[in-house]
Every structure is written in C-alpha cells, then in structure tokens.
Amino acid sequence: MITIKRPEDFARMRRAGICVAEVHQATRDAAKPGVSTKELDELAVEIIEAHGCTPSFYGYLGTYPGHICASPNSVIVHGIPGDHVLVEGDLISVDVGAIYEGYHADAAVSFGVGELAADVAKLNDDTRRAMWAGIAAVRPGARVGDIGAAVQAVGDEGGYGIIREYVGHGIGQKMHEEPQVPNYGRKGKGMRLRTGMAICIEPMFTLGGEETAVLDDEWTVVTADGSWACHWEHTVALTPDGVQVLTVGEHVSTDLADNLGHV
C-alpha cells in the first residue's frame, strides 16, 4: 500500500533520519581492524536509544536478531552482526533503520576499513554515485523507471553486476511499503511519483555477477560467485516544499539541490 505523508509525518521521519545518520558516522569512526560487527551493533543501540527512537530492524519479521545490518565484502545485504572481526581492507555496508513516533527512516553506507584495493574503492564510489543519480531523478510526476534507469546507467557504465532480486521501497509507518524501487528500469515506465510519498533508493552493485544466495541463517545475502558487493541507501521524501533527503546529518541540508554535488 502506498501512503501519503503530511508535513508533520515527514518531520518525524526526519528525526528518525538524523538518528540513522549519527549511527552511520559513529560506526564508520569505530570500524577499525580488530573490531567486531557485534560491537558496531552495540554502539548503534546506544545511539538509537539516546535519540528516543526504536530500531526498525530488531525483531523484523519476528526473527532478525540485530539492530543494524553489517555486510562485509561478499555480503550484499542483511548481514547479521556478530563475531566477524574487521581487518584492514574490508569493505563493509552498515544499514540501519530507526522509528520516531511511529515513522521510519532507513539508510545504508559502505566504507573501507583502512585502505581499499583500487577496484573496490571504485566500486564503492560508483555505487554511491548511482544512488545520488537515482535520487536526482525524483520529482513529482516522475516515474519509478526513471530512478531505476539512472541507477542502472552508472552500473552498466562501470561493468558491475546490478542486483535485481533486492530493491528499494516505499517507507513511512512501515519500513517496507509500496512502491518497489528497482535498481534497473526504463525511463517513462512504472508508477508515477507524487507529493507526499517517501521512498528508499538503494543500489547494490558487485564486482562480478548479479546472482545471489542466502546463507543458512536465512538472512545473510551473499554474491553467488563470491565477488565483493557494495550497498548505499537514503530515504527520500517528496514534500510540499520539494524533494528532501531525510537521512543526512543534523547540520546537513535536506534539500535535493544542496546534495546534487554528490552525483
């Protein structure tokens, strides 16, 4: 179901988005060689609680055991934080959602532990760029296919595997709402966007193919060929005052025009 949010609903989502951005900054700062993904999860809990929020992920579908998803190297998404110890050269995605007064915000960042290999660093830069290209396509009257086409163009240019099985989504009082927002598509196709909607745009690229596999924990999604993967995501709102990115830091402008330098 697609939900249309009011300005006061977007304000709640923005409060949750500030919390998400702070978790990202803190986990990035803490992610050093020798630190476990469980320690990153524990840090996230402290920040979420300090913001008066609750985690979107913990207990999701009755079974998810973490407060963040921590997905290193060949893990694409939904990596369960635990005993994995970070080492120099790892690429890790930290995905986190928070709820403030019933409204969700959801975002993911990927970053290196120390210095990344050149091809992995380029993968990370290009996946981030693809996310911003998708965000730049968001406006009232645009179509979901416009977003997918923009993301896909960056992935195709880089020769990456573009994950098709896992996609972006609408968001509001539920973390996952309609519409689905694929990372591929054709301009002018798909649902038309309108003011009041909020969506998550989240490209996932790999250095190999697009095939995926799920581990025995029934959550962790990895590349089928063992290639390394990258994931970036922001929550984007079509507000009456324009398109805004809700999951940037407290002192960062949410206006799309102020963020397009990231493309």
Image (cartoon, rainbow, N blue to C red):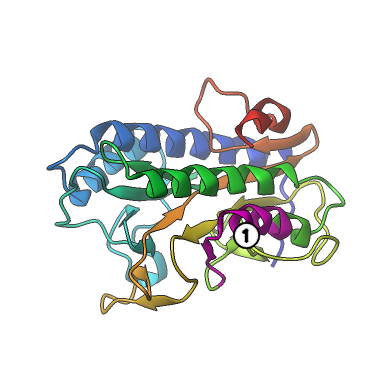
Q: Measured from the top left, where is residue 145 in percent x and y?
A: 76, 62
Q: Measured from the top left, where is residue 171 in percent x and y?
A: 60, 55
Secondary structure type for disc 1: helix
24 left or right of 160 in image: left
Locate the C terminus and report the quarter of the image it occupies: top right
Residue 229 appears in the picture as rendered: yes
- The image shows residue 1, relative to residue 70, as above or below, that is below
At a point 15% along the width and 43% down the height, the residue shown is: 35
Q: Main secondary structure of the magenta part?
A: helix
Choose between 47 and 184: the one closer to the eye. Answer: 184
Residue 105 appears in the picture as rendered: no
220 left or right of 34 in image: right
Which residue is label 1 attached to? 156
Amino acid, disc 1: Asp
Q: Measured from the top left, where is residue 71 in percent x and y?
A: 33, 56
- The image shows residue 212, relative to residue 181, as above or below, that is below
69 left or right of 142 in image: left
| Residue interval drawn in magenta | 148-164
How many dots with numbers? 1
Residue 193: quarter of image: bottom right
